[in-house]
Amino acid sequence: MWNENKVRIKDIAEELGLSTATVSNVLHGKTQKISDSTVKAVEQKLEERGYIPNMAATLLARNNSRIVGVVVNDHPKYEGHVFEDSFLSAAINYLSDETEANGYFMMLKKAKKITEIIAFASMWNLDGVVVIGFCEDEYQDLRDRIRVPFVIYDGFLDRQNRFGNIIIDDFDGGRQAGQYLKEMGHSRVLCIADNEICMDLLRYQGLCEGLGAKADFMKIPMQAAERDSFYKNQLTTLKGYTAIFAVSDFYALELMRFLQKNGLRIPEDISILGFDGSREAENSIPKLTTVAQDNLLRARTSMGLLMKMIEGSAESKTVCIPVKLSVGDSVKERKEGIHIEPNSNTCRQ
């Protein structure tokens, strides 16, 4: 097979009777001053001779690289397996499709510090960045230090900033879960999360709103081994609730497996709800009741806004994506009555 060491730009230029500068400019996308017929001739000859350029150098030489970076916070809670998380893998899957649909390449990176994005964007001449999983003060610091537009796919902000922000209606998702539990006759309800801030706090507050009463809250450890020991120590306490709402499907399914392992039946003994609408929730036994978000819509909205920001045709803004309760088999009714599907409210900012 031919490669660029065997077929040189000089060889292509000589065969076509052109200068090496002209061939190089076509390779690097600098064709403003070159005729269409010449561009076509060069491209055909390159293909014919099997010339394989150094793509990194080619992209860096262009004014627009056609690369969108997707950067994920490699948070310690993932214990080195960040891309194995079901929510993140689903997000990356849809973002990849939407990036290609817009004619761009996607370059994926995990980062322990948001400042790593600065060198990453510069090194690869990124046209835009999608950022997942960092905190509000970090986003603002990044905005002050980076020139390319970026969109926050999954994060938390309580004020408008100079970048795109795609959120889901966390409060209403919790409200729908709380309303459903209330309709199903549950009053002893517990919420579990690994923190008491940002979107997890909104989901808890929404839960209380839907219940019409304050649910109990239990902060759980971020590390898996510590959670297992924690649940063992709290087993008696957990048995005192008729329903437990976890702020993610990951935590809901993990807790469900723990309770089943310890002889409790789901939902006969304890009802479980999650948040995200993951594939694992769909396939769990029993099927998990969860607040589902539309990952395709979220990815499409994120990339649509980023493309407009790259083109300079749109200002940064916050867009709220609605969520909807997906009823499975993990919640047991504890009173007689008619089940009412929850209604979706306007996003609360």
Image (tube, grey):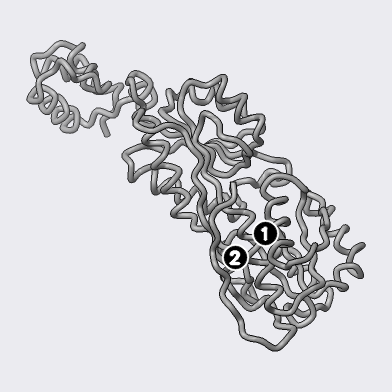
Asked whether disc 2 touches disc 1, contact meaning CB atoms under 8 Å apart, the reply is yes
Label 1: state its secondary structure.
helix
Relative to 25, is 157 above or below? Answer: below
Q: Position of residue 126 (x, y in %)?
A: 43, 27
Q: Position of residue 325 (x, y in %)?
A: 58, 67
Which residue, given by chain and number where applicable, does mark 1 sit on? 250
Q: Position of residue 209 (x, y in %)?
A: 70, 62
Could one spot residue 260 in this view of the protein?
A: no
> To which quarter of the image does residue 177 belong?
bottom right
Amino acid type, residue under disc 1 in the picture = Phe
Amino acid type, residue under disc 2 in the picture = Glu
Which residue, given by chain and number where applicable, does mark 2 sit on? 280
Q: CA distance from mark 2 to mark 1?
A: 8 Å
In the picture, measured across the screen, residue 249 lies left or right of residue 8, that is right
Q: Nearer the viewer, residue 53 or 120?
A: 120
**What residue lies at 68% left-to-right and 58% top-to-bottom?**
206
Question: How many other residues sit within 10 Å of disc 1, few (<14), some (14-19) or many (≥20)?
Answer: some
Q: Position of residue 5 (x, y in %)?
A: 30, 21
